[in-house]
Image (spheres, helix red, strand yellow):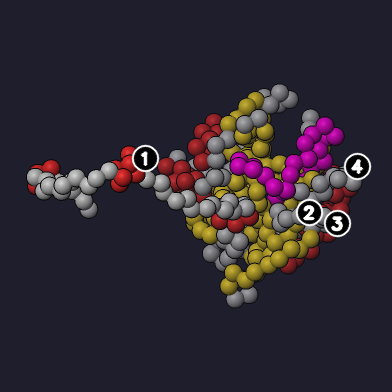
Amino acid sequence: MPSTFPRGRFVWNDLLTTDPAAAAGFYAKVVGWKVQPYEHDPAYRLWTMGRSPMGGLMRLPEEARRMGEPSRWMPHVAVPDVDQTVQRARGMGARVHAPPRDIAPGRFAVLGDPQGAAFSVFTPAPTESEGTDEPGIGGFSWHELAAADWKAAWEFYRTLFGWEHTSSFEMGPGDTYWMFRRAGGERPIGGMYNRPAGMSAPPHWLCYARVASADAAALAVTRSGGKVVNGPMDVPGGDRVVMCVDPQGAAFAVHAVAVRAAAATAPRKRTVAKKRRRPAARVRSKRQAKPKRTKRPRARRRRTR
């Protein structure tokens, strides 16, 4: 595995939904994604933005539906060896929902952390793109864990993926939001916190898609049959986010980068005020003898404000 391998990076996100066709139409309006067939599996489709794939779309397995599992997003984290990672995670109390297996783009397995939040570990094939920590519009820009105990969750994920703490802030008395980056990364890629007492959902990962306007996306959510749970709101750093639920019940969020942050870093162009020159006809009129002033008729007087 090359030294540049992105261990700990969120490299892919799948939507498992009860209605793939309806979900495709919904996210096209909210985020701007299109879907295209996947040549290796007719039951699986790719989210795309331009020519770039952003994630996957598939029907929620029938067995999962019978067990009452809701539609949901599944994040995939890059690891150098799926089998070793699964063995290590199991030793730390994780559950294996789907054992390691090969697919066309690489090898993956689905796990549940000790508190129940589901995620996937994935080793991309050498020919696959390794992604980036700074996605553009339509990419997944943030991943957030609502945990039962964020401190215990942090120890689990830090040990498993090598994540590094970047910063934190208090959302309320004793209510910490903890942010992290992958080892050697230049910017945070996610955060975690203790889910509030009123949150009915069990511990889970929330995937954020980057959009041009969080407010426009929120309006598209409600107009397209989804629900805005929280926001639009500004977060520390000036970015703007909205937490939502799609029509099939999958929770997700959208994220818009602060405009002022980009403007502050752009060099300012100095402008010099130019003197206004009078039209040549008026300059010549000054050299001529002044005509005798006559009083204009009131009807022709030009109105001024």
Residue that mark 4 sits on: 1
Where does the image place residue 271, in percent across and percent down from the top left? 54, 52
* SS state under label 4: loop
| Res. 65 image quadrant | top right
Nearer to the camera, 282 or 301:
282
Residue that mark 2 sits on: 185
Mark 2 and mark 1 lie on one chain; the one further toward the N terminus is 2
**Pointer 1: residues within 10 angstroms few (<14), some, or many (20+)?**
few
Magenta region, residue range: 118-139
| Residue 122 drawn in magenta | yes
What is the three-letter code of the residue carrying label 2? Gly
| Res. 280 image quadrant | top left
Q: Residue at 60% across / 42% down in the picture?
A: 137
Residue 156 can be seen, yes or no: no
Nearer to the camera, 106 or 276:
276
| Res. 163 image quadrant | bottom right
Mark 3 and mark 4 lie on one chain; the one further toward the N terminus is 4
* Of the two numbered discs 2 and 1 in the rendering, the one whose residue sits closer to the viewer: 1
Q: CA distance from mark 4 to mark 2?
A: 17 Å
Q: Are marks 3 and 1 in contact (CB under 8 Å)?
A: no
Mark 4 and mark 1 lie on one chain; the one further toward the N terminus is 4
Residue that mark 3 sits on: 91
Mark 4 and mark 2 lie on one chain; the one further toward the N terminus is 4
